[in-house]
Image: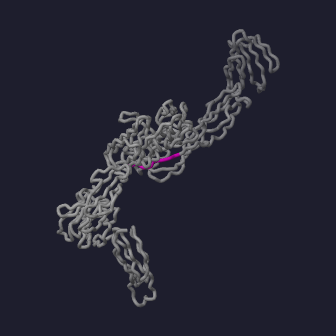
Amino acid sequence: MPGVDRALHCYTQHGTQHASQLQPCTQPVQPNPVSFILSLSTKMKIILPGPVLSGSCKLREVPPNPHCSSLTVSCFFNFTSPSGIVLSPNYPEDYGNHLHCVWLILARPESRIHLAFNDIDVEPQFDFLVIKDGATAEAPVLGTFSGNQLPSSITSSGHVARLEFQTDHSTGKRGFNITFTTFRHNECPDPGVPVNGKRFGDSLQLGSSISFLCDEGFLGTQGSETITCVLKEGSVVWNSAVLRCEAPCGGHLTSPSGTILSPGWPGFYKDALSCAWVIEAQPGYPIKITFDRFKTEVNYDTLEVRDGRTYSAPLIGVYHGTQVPQFLISTSNYLYLLFSTDKSHSDIGFQLRYETITLQSDHCLDPGIPVNGQRHGNDFYVGALVTFSCDSGYTLSDGEPLECEPNFQWSRALPSCEALCGGFIQGSSGTILSPGFPDFYPNNLNCTWVIETSHGKGVFFTFHTFHLESGHDYLLITENGSFTQPLRQLTGSRLPAPISAGLYGNFTAQVRFISDFSMSYEGFNITFSEYDLEPCEEPEVPAYSIRKGLQFGVGDTLTFSCFPGYRLEGTARITCLGGRRRLWSSPLPRCVAECGNSVTGTQGTLLSPNFPVNYNNNHECIYSIQTQPGKGIQLKAKAFELAEGDLLKVMTGDGRPCAECSYSPPPLSLVRWTSLPLPLES
């Protein structure tokens, strides 16, 4: 490993009274990367590819336990090895503020120094790396660097190079990673190997050549594929810059197979991109693309895939986040891909492979399976149909089946399974997902889900994933349709305990998700199931009444009616109400025998007041019986007991004593009048 060797001496500092208590030093914090051996009175060899060790290990007198001072990355150092790596302090983490670092690279007098940048990210305009052609601060400047654009390599004219790094009081960045090599005056410097490329040839002698080739998916954007070591103006130099290999933003691809990478791969892509690729195969050969890696900013950085050569071609799908199908197949010999990014967050992007494929002679190709879904049907012959369904919580974008047509192409594109913003869910169980789950949810959402369960059931929510922007994005749960005073209001990343809802007897619960315009996270994965609500207590049956209904759960209804001759006081129909306590909607009715009554129809019952309890004194009750003209009235007394002095008079409709009534001992009396008032005096 190229680097710098340094030795750390572990020693003790003690008084004679503690000489017998000497112990080995404790193991120091290990720099990364580093290997070491530690023992008392032994040198510890530390091999560092860039950071430098400083500090010492001592044993204090009281208490007699050894300790080591911390290892720090030096900001001043001389490199004397023939090759190595220079790293900014704390690389690749934030290098910090108020730095003034100096590194000297000292080669043999007959050698020169070549510096190649592997990485640089320095606060633009305020933090600077200066490389000088000599040992002193007054030496000529070879280059001043700031920002994150990777510079070309630098070669010194002599055997000493000076690197100065200065930072201000504010923002720190990742810093830099520079590889240096030394070479003789009659040689060209080692050009290294291009990032994302290969090198062919090792000779650095005057007149020798080295070739380079970019890895698949990358293109040479600067430099040459072949460089030659030449003598130019008295110096031995390469005749061209080393090839730089970068992932291009778009292109027209005609090879039978290849790789498409997001610009900047394997690093993050840049903002405000609009990159279009057209993949062209030979006529009659469709194109298959396979996603190896895919991760973009959810909802804002998208890859559109279209089934043709232009943007107006039919859309196969728009992909973002991490949810992509395993593969896609065109119906023609063209595919159009458009990668668009906004001006904010970025991510690693994508790596996909494309290839032309041969159509089968008797069946369609495998159409694939949607992400978060299933395919039903494995027959791909002409005329066969395949259908798709989604995992719980996702909705199928197109429910129409795919048919294998006579040209051995499917009738439509593969559908997708999506987690939507709100909806109506009816069933005994199900899943609610934040939009885009498991990717981050979008901003500015206002989604409402209504869950309806079976009669007499409540809704039981169980949380499996929950991560919202704390204090800004909320999940509200209610059971009465109003979100002004929700049952629960949830935010943050703590997994909530299960929640029981639907207690109000409408057998529904409502869930609302609100996100603001800024940060977003993974969201939520919630399952629900129905459960039996606690029933109301079984009510008594009022005296002289009949109850209809045997169910006492929330929403169940009971109906009451009185025996003949009694009048119902109160509500004939009561319902078991929801809520925190189980109550019936009204008090139980009662059936009463009143003083007097008016009866119409072909039959009926007359009761004395309070029957079968004794009637009260000082009553005069009139009972009127009305029947059809031409009909007589027959009275039958099923119970008859009056106190002495109390009378039941049978009179005609005009109030006269009934002269044409015939009487017999109870319960017989026959009257030929069509209406009778019956006064009862007590």
Furthest-bottom residue in this view: 16
How many badges with numbers are in the image?
0
Residue 69 higher or lower than 118, as above or below: below
- Residue 92 placement: quadrant: bottom left
- Magenta region, residue range: 519-526
Please check the rendered image and state whether residue 525 is part of the magenta-colored stretch, yes or no.
Answer: yes
Residue 568 higher or lower than 157, as above or below: above
Please check the rendered image and state whether residue 329 is part of the magenta-colored stretch, yes or no.
Answer: no
Q: Nearer the viewer, residue 277 or 466?
A: 277
- Residue 75 placement: quadrant: bottom left
Q: Can residue 174 be seen?
A: no
Q: Nearer the viewer, residue 669 or 114?
A: 114
192 left or right of 326? left
Residue 619 higher or lower than 157, as above or below: above
Q: Nearer the viewer, residue 151 or 123?
A: 151
Furthest-front residue in this view: 207
Quarter holding the C terminus?
A: top right
Residue 459 x/y as whole percent: 56, 42
Q: Can residue 603 be seen?
A: yes
Residue 156 x/y as whole percent: 22, 66
Q: Nearer the viewer, residue 431 or 501?
A: 431
Q: Residue at x 78, y 20 (%)?
A: 636
Furthest-top residue in this view: 630
Q: Residue at x 70, y 20 (%)?
A: 679
Residue 42 x/y as whole percent: 41, 81
Q: Residue at x 35, y 56 (%)?
A: 198
Quarter holding the N terminus?
A: bottom left
Furthest-right residue in this view: 665
